[in-house]
Amino acid sequence: MIICPADLALKDLENMLERDRAITLMYRSELDLRVAETIIPLNATLIGKKIHEIQMPEKCRVALVCRDTSYVFPEPDLELKSGDKVLLLGDAPSVARTVELLRSSETA
């Protein structure tokens, strides 16, 4: 796989304009496969919940969690924290729904 800096810059611009607030790192249309990264916001309702407690779509998985200066391949009992960068893998609609779920917040 060859990664072109110009393609990455264009993808970043497209991602800024997207509504789901996630960066698409890869999309394979023939499989409808999307790999995306999103950040858990400070006011997310799921902060402190473990991955297995989150009702994610069946066709989406948390592949990696980056926290501070390290990363982990998440186990089901990993507790999510604000600022975590979460790498998601699945079909495009399921990834989009999971991004909404991870970024959802309570309104007062």
Image: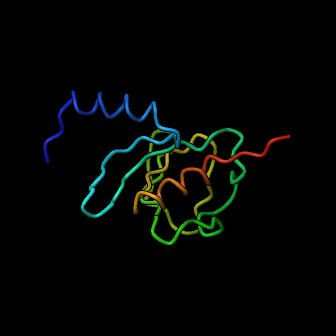
- The residue lying at 48 percent from left, 52 percent from top is 65
Query: Who's the residue at 37% across and 28% down the image?
Result: 13
Task: Point out residue 99 in the picture as x, y percentages from the top left corner.
Answer: 54, 51
What sort of colour scheme is used for the picture?
rainbow
Quarter residue 11 falls in = top left
**Quadrant location of the C terminus in the rendered image:** top right
Q: Nearer the viewer, residue 61 or 95?
A: 95
Residue 33 locus on image (x, y percent): 33, 60
Q: Is residue 75 above or below residue 65?
A: below
Along the line of sight, the residue nearer the viewer: 107 or 84: 107
Q: Where residue 84 sits: x, y (%)?
A: 55, 45
Q: Is residue 44 left or right of residue 92?
A: right
Q: How many marks?
A: 0
Q: Residue at x 44, y 46 (%)?
A: 37
Image: 38 above or below 8: below
Seen in the image, is 108 located left or right of residue 37? right
Q: 30 above or below 35?
A: below
In the picture, measured across the screen, residue 48 lies left or right of residue 28, that is right
Of all residues, the one furthest to the left in this rendering is: 2
Residue at 47% x, 37% y: name it.
18
Please say if 7 is above or below 87.
above
Residue 15, given in percent of the width and then of the height, sits at 41, 35
Instruction: Find the residue positioned furthest to the bottom.
Output: 58
